């Protein structure tokens, strides 16, 4: 069965939602229009619809738009429907207690990992992803642990996607990365620095 053509207005509304990032969580109408290459009039109409459905909120004092709380409701439905999440939590808690380290449950979503659960360590210095955070797979220990046991051709595509979006790792060699994953599989755990 062939995929049908996308509905243009839905596609545009999704482009608006996707232009919000951790780095730019609040944006003006002008910034949104420039980012997605759309007229301000069209963006304004779409924002009004998204705001009406609580997917977008607008700060009346600054005029900046943000993602709305409706996403928390939607995310909780997804997490609630994920049996793996509920089943795994006691095991994650036990691992965190036994080793004194942060433990997370993540899944692969395309070229990224999404964190479903994070149990933070009690150590003073710690680095933990947030539940719902989406990060490039190769540049996380969780992602490396998943990639280490996947077919080479799939891993190469994921690494290529991760490198394309990360200027900090442009000098990294795909061959070195594949070797790191081979060592990860042999060792039984992954290491991610920085």
Image (spheres, rainbow, N blue to C red):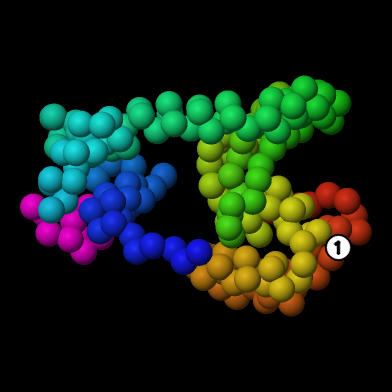
Q: Residue at x 82, y 24 (%)?
A: 94
Q: Tell me, yes or no, if residue 86 can be seen here.
A: yes
Q: Position of residue 100 (x, y in %)?
A: 79, 28
Circle 1: element type: helix
Q: Position of residue 154 (x, y in %)?
A: 69, 68
> Which quadrant holds residue 155?
bottom right
Q: Residue at x 74, y 77 (%)?
A: 175
> Which quadrant holds residue 99?
top right
Q: Position of residue 106 (x, y in %)?
A: 66, 42
Task: Determine which residue is flagged by label 1.
Answer: 183
Position of 192 with respect to 73 (left or right) is right
On screen, residue 12 above or below 5 = above
- Magenta range is 31-41
On screen, residue 3 above or below 141 = below
Q: Residue at x 34, y 42 (%)?
A: 25
On screen, residue 22 above or below 148 = above
User: Mark 1: few, some, or many residues within 10 Å (few <14, many ≥20)?
Assistant: some
Task: Please name whichever residue, 82 or 112, is drawn nearer the observer in this view of the structure.
Answer: 82
Q: Is residue 34 magenta?
A: yes
Q: Main secondary structure of the magenta part?
A: helix
Going by the picture, which residue comes out furthest to the right? 186
Position of 124 with respect to 25 (left or right) is right
Q: Tell me, yes or no, if residue 100 can be seen here.
A: no
Position of 107 with respect to 20 (left or right) is right
On screen, residue 191 above or below 168 = above
């Amino acid at each position: 069965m062939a995929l049908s053509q996308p509905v243009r207005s839905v596609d545009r509304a999704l482009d608006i939602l996707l232009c919000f990032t951790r780095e730019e969580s609040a944006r003006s109408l002008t910034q949104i229009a420039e980012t997605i290459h759309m007229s301000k009039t069209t963006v304004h109409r779409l924002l009004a619809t998204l705001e009406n459905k609580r997917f977008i909120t607008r700060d009346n004092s600054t005029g900046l738009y943000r993602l709305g709380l409706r996403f928390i409701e939607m995310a909780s439905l997804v997490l609630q429907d994920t049996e793996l999440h509920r089943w795994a939590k006691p095991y994650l808690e036990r691992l965190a207690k036994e080793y004194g380290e942060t433990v997370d449950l993540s899944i692969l979503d395309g070229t990224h990992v999404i964190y479903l659960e994070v149990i933070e360590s009690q150590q003073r210095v710690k680095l933990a992803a947030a539940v719902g955070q989406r990060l490039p797979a190769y540049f996380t220990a969780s992602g490396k642990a998943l990639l280490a046991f996947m077919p080479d051709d799939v891993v190469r595509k994921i690494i290529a996607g991760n490198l394309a979006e990360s200027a900090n790792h442009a000098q990294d060699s795909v061959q070195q990365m594949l070797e790191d994953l081979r060592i990860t599989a042999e060792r039984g755990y992954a290491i991610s620095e920085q």
